[in-house]
Amino acid sequence: RRSFPHPSPRAAAAAAPPCSASGAASSPASAHLPPPLRAPISTAPSLPPPPRPSSPQTLASPWTTTSSRPAASQALKASAKLSHLKSPTKPDAVLSFLAAQGFSSSDVAAVVAGDPKVLCSRVDGYLGPVVAQLTGLGLSRSQTARLISCCHGNLHLTSIVSKLQYYMPLFGSIDNTLRALKGHFYLISSNLERVVKPNVATLRDSGLGDCDIAKLCLAHTRLLTTSVESIRAIVACAESLGVPRGSRMFRHAVCAVAFLGVDKIAAKVVYLKKTFRWSDAQVGIAVSKFPPLLRRSKDSLQRRSEFLISEVGLERTYIAHRPMLLSYSLEGRLRPRYYVVKFLKENGFLNHDRDYYNTLNISEKTFMEKFVCPHKEAAPHLAEDYAGACRGEVPTRFRIA
């Protein structure tokens, strides 16, 4: 057996490649390892190394890139679902098909990001018929892309067309239907006859019209896929707030209590009583007039209470009978309009007292026409000060000149 002498330390150091700028120094343990033996000289011809298989991320990256920048996060998301891909044949065919159908690069990116497995689809047996069915319903290329991206592989269902034909009139438009599906894509896989249609019938029986049901189900899409018993319980809870069925406010009451839970509703009632110093009767009045009050955050309610009671000086009964006060933006409406009216009163620009609530429930255009524009000459800085107040730059006092 032929032995090979070890090279000297100086020769070994000269032969070692230098460390890169980003590399770490050798560990003490590696310093004691013997240098590797030199390979014996061979007369056999050298063969090229076998090709390295493409990683899922490498395969996914070109197909999750928009025209403006690579979508790295989309590629990472896609790679886990494309781990079985060994060839780009199917993805290339899918991309060619979508391009031929007129899909933009952003549409294609949305499709792949929403459902990377679409790249594994057969064009003739799956993707082609699906696109033909959707465009036949009147969906644009962009809308078709949005639908495919939010349905997470459920488009293979044979009932997709019949479901869309039911949902589009229910929600009022294709765009509203896509919004609902994006928030709750189980609508595609839910059974229309056994689940969805009975729920809609139950909502109709409670006195809600089709327009109310559409708005309600856009806000709480789960109402279409829950049980009939749950819907009946929600309707009963809404009615217990003192809002009669068939009234204009009943939809808002159902929306306010939907999936909120009895304990959370009771806790919010207690908080309202404490924050606004309301009695049980006053809480009942406020909630029945404005049921969304039950979903307002505690911080939002606390800040409005401090401003309306401590600074504006409103009585608790006044607020209870006008709970819409608590729906307005504190920074964008409540404070700025209060400062304008206060300024006008203090400087004698108002001939008679104006109710604060009436200055809030008018449009911005009307408010400017009634309270700001008529005083341009006497108070030239009023419009500027009001605009600054709406941006949160509330001055200590508005200026006359």
Image (cartoon, grey):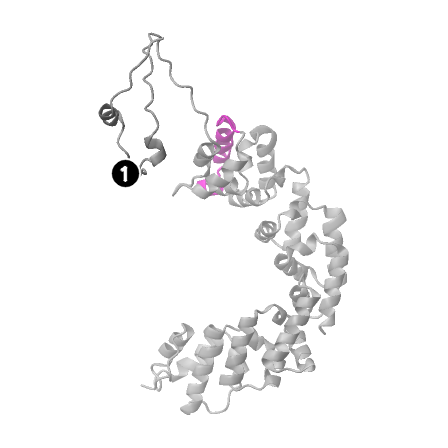
Q: Quadrant of residue 138?
A: top right
* Residue 105 is one of the magenta-drawn residues: yes
**Label 1 sits on residue:** 21
Q: Nearer the viewer, residue 349 or 244?
A: 244
Give the side of residue 376 with respect to residue 182, left or right.
left
Q: Is residue 102 above or below residue 220?
A: above
Image quadrant where one finds the C terminus: bottom left
Looking at the image, can residue 358 be seen? no
* Residue 325 within the magenta-colored segment of the rendering: no
- Tell me which residue sits at (37%, 83%) in the image: 396
Q: Which residues are magenta?
A: 85-107
User: Which residue is found at the position 62% from the left and 51% from the top?
Assistant: 184
| In front of the other: 213 or 56 | 56
Q: Is residue 391 left or right of residue 265?
A: left
User: Can residue 374 be seen at all in this image of the molecule?
Assistant: yes
What residue do we see at 37% from left, 84% from top?
398
Give coordinates of residue 78: x percent, y percent: 50, 38
The amino acid pointed to by label 1 is Ala
Res 35 → quadrant: top left
Q: Secondary structure at mark 1?
A: loop
